[in-house]
Amino acid sequence: MQNRSSTHPSGQSVGIVLMIAAMLVIPIVDGLAKYLSDDYSPLFISWARYAASTALILPIAFARNRRRVLPTDGIPLHATRTLCLVGAMTLYFFAISEVSLVIAASAYFVGPLVAVALSVIFLGERLTVAKVLGILVGVIGALIVLQPSGDFDAYALLALGAGCLFAVYLVITRRTSAQSDPIRTLSFQCLFGTLLLTPPAIFVAEIPAFDLVPLFVGLGLFSLLGHFLTIIAF
């Protein structure tokens, strides 16, 4: 039997690589949403992202798990993490519809820094010197880009709020990742998110132009991939 301590560094390295891959995929979603925001409401884009993801993941979940496509345990936590992600994504899509991706992303990616602090408080993880230095460097970098003493756009606050909600999502995902199959977790996230966004999205819904349909599909596909990698990384 392998010693647990000898396998831990390898597993940690895989998790880091997967999380880096996830963070490289998610900006693709941001770029698509920014482009689509010229013609569609950010609320409709948010709904379309979840609807497309649901249409893509449910057939996979049915093929893999038959009728047990959703998690059966920890539903309140799954619902809370989805609420946080829906809120984060919607606020962020509103932000990027009005400000540049550079400004919005700089505010939004304060989220992982907040997640580090929350993981210490709620998950009991150690706060090492490396983590503290990482937080300081991240905060300094965000301040340089945002320039809060200059022409600070109020919409950047939406991105900042989105980042904080994303931090809570990350912490809850860390808590639930070992308790549920990733495909079931993702299926619940996509389906519940679609149901949450459907009522408000009805008021701003539009039939997408035919040539933009692939972009909406791509929005769902890359979102699905990014969050799947995040869940697997944890």
Image: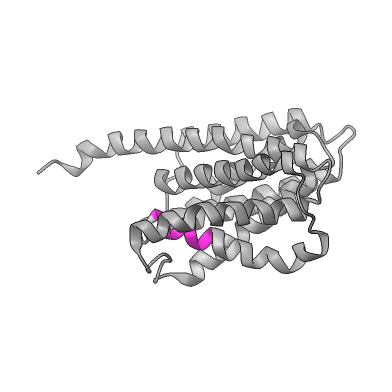
Image quadrant of residue 133? Answer: top right
Residue 103 can be seen, yes or no: yes
Q: Position of residue 22 (x, y in %)?
A: 51, 38
Q: Is residue 109 magenta?
A: no
The residue located at (82%, 64%) in the rendering is 203
Q: Position of residue 205 (x, y in %)?
A: 79, 58
Quarter of the figure that contains the N terminus: top left
The residue located at (66%, 35%) in the rendering is 139
Image quadrant of residue 159? Answer: top right
Q: Residue furthest left?
A: 1
Instruction: Report the side of 8 relative to 168 (left or right).
Output: left
The residue located at (68%, 31%) in the rendering is 140
- Residue extent of the magenta highlight: 182-189
Q: Position of residue 214 (x, y in %)?
A: 65, 40
Q: Is residue 169 above or below residue 35?
A: below
85 and 41: which is toward the camera:
41
